[in-house]
Amino acid sequence: MAGKLGPELRWFFKGVIPSEVREWFSKLSGGDRPLKEESRKDLYLIVKDRKDLALKISRGSLELKWRQDAQPLSLSGPGLIGVKEIWRKEKWRFAKEFADELVIAFGQPHLKGRRAEVAKTRLMHKLQVDASGELRALAAGEKPAYLLQVELTSLTKHDRPWWTLCLEMAGEPDNLPEFFAGAVEKILHGHPQLYLQASHSYGYPQWLALSD
């Protein structure tokens, strides 16, 4: 599977997700409970000195993402600055009977190159954006022109807790930047005083390069 992904805005933080952040996140779609994905472990194969490439083995697939663009995005709220990134993705699925063996093989400590196993537990809201820019929960079976995905994910890297907040949109390319900026403003209005600054805003490759 290949394709250009929509704009993505992500921040990383050390520690566990604060309770006030969880409470704020739970109410983003009018009180509907967010989708909770099964916990998983992704094995990243780190490409040295490349913050624009992410290569990982996850859920029976080899996935390659490479960044097409990165631009600062300033929002009207105080303390809201991030880096909007555009990524492309290629994905190759393994035969099911070989998936576990490949993870074990790539995880061997004596192999050349760096690897990092990251445990993830992700909560997610899927919201549709209508022509006026209003947000509402996505009903089952709906295929909106613009889809905003908001995720809150607990992470464990080298046995230390982190978490990440991410907003990503897919839709018609002509108005996508405008709709994305408007949706981000609405979602982050009233956030629980998060420190959403550019210094915390980057993709997984840069996060993996950080020393805990």
Image: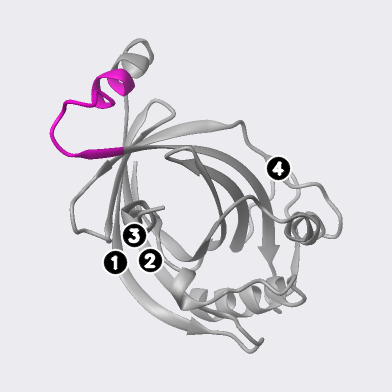
Q: Nearer the viewer, mark 3 or mark 2?
A: 3
Residue 48 is situated, as x and y percent measured from the top left of the image, at: 18, 52
Query: Mark 4 touching mark 2, by CB under 8 A?
Result: no
Is residue 210 positioned above or below 141 on the image? below
Outermost residue toward the right in this view = 31
209 in magenta: no
Is residue 61 positioned above or below 164 on the image? above
In this orientation, does residue 173 appear?
no
Query: Mark 1 touching mark 2, by CB under 8 A?
Result: yes
Is residue 149 positioned above or below 106 on the image? below
Q: Residue at x 35, y 57 (%)?
A: 210
The answer to which image quadrant residue 211 occupies is bottom left
Check disc 2 and report its element: helix, strand or loop. strand
Q: Which residues are the magenta region?
A: 102-115
Residue under label 4, please give it.
Answer: 35
Residue under label 2, please give it.
Answer: 86
* Crowd around label 1: few <14 · some 14–19 · many ≥20 (10 Å): few
Looking at the image, tell me whether mark 4 or mark 2 is earlier in sequence order. 4
The answer to which image quadrant residue 14 occupies is bottom right
* Crowd around label 2: few <14 · some 14–19 · many ≥20 (10 Å): some
Check disc 3 and report its element: helix, strand or loop. helix
Q: Nearer the viewer, mark 3 or mark 4?
A: 3
114 in magenta: yes
The mark total stands at: 4
Q: Residue at x 59, y 48 (%)?
A: 153
Residue under label 1, please give it.
Answer: 68
Check disc 1 and report its element: helix, strand or loop. strand
**Horizontal side, residue 109 vs residue 203: left or right:** left
The amino acid type found where label 4 is placed reads: Leu
Residue 124 is situated, as x and y percent measured from the top left of the image, at: 65, 49
